Amino acid sequence: MTDNGEVSFYDQTGRITMTGALSPATLAHYESIGASYVAGIYDTALYFVQGGTIVTRPASPAILVDFDLVDVHIGSVVRINKTDYVADSDTVHLSLTYPGDYDVTVLDFPYQDAVFKVTKI
């Protein structure tokens, strides 16, 4: 148990699922049900747990070249304006239908999310 009750809970993949400052009784309850946690509050976008130790999430290898996402891991999620697609290739062409700005994110845990702003004229 931590002195101040600040903890980060994580799942079997090491993804931090919840953080907070808990009372000793609440923390004891989570311990009794076998919840995994580390002492301290960590940013879920930047850290994960590996072997019970907090580590930095590596930078995503994905990059944007014109309207292509390259170096994308197959199985990654490509989110375009809140709609998710699963990458079936290491290069993903963005076929954007309408002019405007698009928020594009590559999600590939444990890598950090790669975030891009794409404008179609």
Image: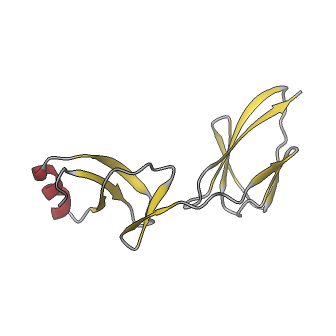
Vertical relation: 118 (above or below) 14: above
x and y, in percent, of residue 19 in the image: 33, 48
The quadrant holding residue 2 is bottom left
Q: Position of residue 30 (x, y in %)?
A: 20, 57
Q: Is residue 22 left or right of residue 102?
A: left
Residue ID at (74%, 33%): 102
Where residue 54 sits, quadrant-wise, is: bottom left
Residue lying furthest front: 3
Residue at far left of view: 25
Q: Residue at x 47, y 57 (%)?
A: 47
Q: Residue at x 63, y 58 (%)?
A: 59
The way the protein has been coloured in the rendering is secondary structure
Q: Quadrant of the N terminus?
A: bottom left
Q: Split into 4 quadrants, where in the image is the C terminus? A: top right
Q: Residue furthest bottom?
A: 51
Closest to the observer: 95 or 69? Answer: 69
Q: Nearer the viewer, residue 49 or 69?
A: 49
Identify which residue, 65 or 86, lies in the foreground.
65
Residue 51 rendering spot, x and y as whole percentages: 40, 74
Report whether 43 appears left or right of 80.
Answer: left
Horizontal side of 101 relative to 60 (left or right) equals: right
> 103 left or right of 69?
left
Q: Position of residue 69 (x, y in %)?
A: 79, 51
Front position in the image: 37 or 85: 37
In this rendering, the answer to whether 104 lies above or below 4 is: above
Q: How many marks?
A: 0
